[in-house]
Amino acid sequence: MPILNFAQALNDALKLEMKRDPNIYVAGEDVGIYGGIFGVTTGLLDQFGSKRVRDTPITESAIVGTAVGAALAGLRPIIEFMMIDFIGVAMDQLYNQAAKMKYMFGGKAKIPMVLRGTCGGGMSAAAQHSQCLEAWFMHVPGLKVVMPSTPYDAKGLLISSIRDDNPVVFLEHKMLYGLEGEVPERTYTIPLGEAHIKREGRNVTVVATAQMVNRALSAAEKLSAEGVSVEVVDPRTLSPLDEGTILESVRKTHRLVIVHEEVKFAGSGAEIAAMVAEKGFDYLDAPILRVAAPFTPVPFSPSLEREFIPSEEKIIQAVKTVMGK
């Protein structure tokens, strides 16, 4: 099986789907000649031409707005945001138009569009280029929210997102683009709303997203040397959320730690914790703990940014705390 990095896996998914369906097009800032700021759209312009790979002006409201109209008219746009931080100027087009149209037209309207956006810190890109904002999108009925952590998942989830008839926000942590893994050459899909157990364990469930999945796995390996068996669950899709897999894991381990790079206050972990408290309280032998970023803008300073982003050490300490150690 070929070894691809995260960006190459996404690129492969785009090429396969654009070959399959001529109604798919890609648009965004620098997605054509430049090949995308992180190289995800490399080669698409040469292969599919300028009608299907469109470099746009620096105007996110127009990028999303035209995609909504194109999707309503029967096309399947895939739009790229250099940074998801820039979504603010296009929120009306996304949450007030794309997300609501199927409902407002009685299910007759289809909005098959994918908004790909990079997120997360680790590059000292400062407060306006480093945020994780997945909770914003989770809060909007009508939007699906996808957040892969591996190259294999990235390809399969992107293909599923492209084929979905609803608007999908597809979040790509920028520190994952170089991560390598086995990725089949063939087309395959991963259902949206289906979590994956990345590591089985008996003592503590750790639910983690994006880059934090890999830190949780590393922490779990270190904890295993101390006799603590950690189960790592990656939701992969935050909306819809696979509640069943999370609850079943907590039923087995009786302890839950949630790890994400968003700020802790009102983050995705708060929803997961509330869901488990409401539906699986009797499974718990210890309070639920969250490991997340502090309630502050992302620092530019590398040393402060390292402290801001949840570390392996903080995950290990949270696991030991719920174990009573």
Image (tube, rainbow, N blue to C red):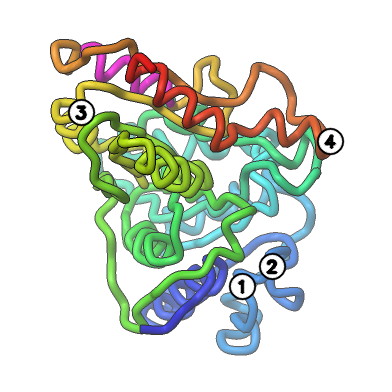
| Image x and y of residue 39, in percent | 66, 71
The reply to whether discs 1 and 3 touch (Cβ–Cβ < 8 Å) is: no
The residue that appears at 41% across and 80% down in the rendered structure is: 16
Magenta stretch mostly in which secondary structure? helix
Position above or below: 117 against 256: below
* Mark 4 or mark 3, earlier in chain: 3
Residue 267, horizontal then vertical, whole percent:
50, 23
| Residue that appears at 50% across and 33% down | 260
- The earlier-in-sequence mark between 4 and 2 is 2
Q: Amino acid at mark 1?
A: Thr
Pointer 4 residue: 300
Give the x, y percent position of residue 255: 27, 22
Instruction: Mark 3 or mark 2: name the one nearer the start of the chain.
Output: 2
First in sequence: mark 1 or mark 3? 1
Disc 2 to disc 1: CB gap under 8 Å: yes
Mark 2, Cα crowd under 10 Å, few <14 / some 14-19 / many 20+, is some
The residue beneath circle 3 is: 253
What segment is highlighted magenta in the picture?
A: 269-279
